Image (cartoon, grey):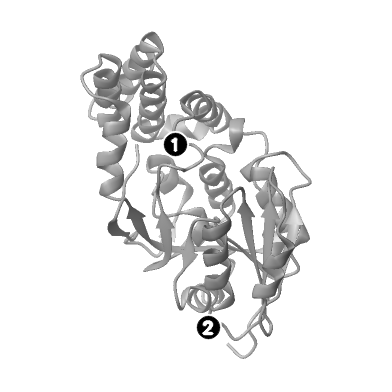
Amino acid sequence: MTSYPSVSAVVPTRDRPELLRAAVRAIVAQDYPGPVETVVVYDQSEPDPALTELSGPDRPVRVVTNTRTAGLAGARNSGTVAATGELVAFCDDDDEWLPGKLRAQVDALAAVPGADFVSCGIRVDYDGNTVERVLERDSVSLADLLRDRMTELHPSTFLIRAAALRDGFGLVDEEIPGSYAEDYEFLLRAARSAPLVNLRTPYVLVRWHKRSYFAQRWDTISEALQWLLERYPEFATQPAGEARVAGQIAFARAASGDSRGALRWARRTIRRNPREPRAYLALAVAGRVVRADAVLRTLHKRGRGI
């Protein structure tokens, strides 16, 4: 590639000053031949103008506030609208890009005609354990995503053509309850337009921790996932995929103390796929055989979620 396009890294943040600085430093330090701006978006928290001191040559750091819907989706969109780059990348404020991430992704995007979106693998850090999650495929279709959320496709790995965000499949949806699963909905919508490009290398360090914003917001999680099933009728074409989401709802209802709701959604899950383990985990939590947080701790240590 003779001329590398400009990139804007959008970093939504809320009350994580130390982790945020680590995230910004990792972006600024990328060995990428083109210009890279970092747009830090403060959501429901006081901006820190001193962050601009982390800027470097062709690596400006800008600080803005979320002027749209409060929450992660609105913050991502505020940053995207403020971005000036030909490509837009996302990075959560508690994650870090690893060396080589940006250049490898831009090269991969340029190599696939008509592609607007590229992701990569992740290195998950939870409670002192590190697990690499790499998707063993170069392309991801809508059908693939309906069947499986593919945790490897983490928002901190997303790199997208700015034109696709503004004139194509669009910005992050701000109507999702609590902004939960906004990344999954975004992936589904992007894949409706064209298959997503994927790199089989873990180029992002993703931190899972007990301070995660959605760690215990079970009612919001349940509401958002029900919204997702209604918004994407295509799930009906993938019984295993629909059962997976229904099982997540069942687990959320159980974790929130709604045993009847958990039973109802577990039954729906089993009807669609009797082999879906989330249904039985939900029933175990609802029956107080095991605690929801114990299940999550075990899964997170393996680099997985519910």
Res. 215 mark = 1
- Between label 1 and label 2, give the one nearer the viewer: 1
Res. 110 mark = none
Q: Is residue 144 above or below residue 181?
A: below
Q: Which is nearer the eye, 174 or 140?
A: 174
Residue at point 22%, 29% (across, down): 275
Res. 31 mark = 2
> Which residue ends up furthest to the top in the rendered image?
260
In which quadrant of the rendered view does residue 86 lie? bottom right
Q: Position of residue 162 (x, y in %)?
A: 69, 63
- Residue 236 lies left or right of residue 224; in this view the side is left
Q: Position of residue 217 (x, y in %)?
A: 49, 29
Measure the C-alpha gap from mark 1 to mark 2: 34 Å
As shown in the figure, which amino acid type bears the numbered disc 2? Answer: Asp
Residue at point 28%, 21% (across, down): 285
Neighbours of disc 2 within 10 Å: few (<14), some (14-19), many (20+): few
Q: Position of residue 267 (x, y in %)?
A: 32, 15
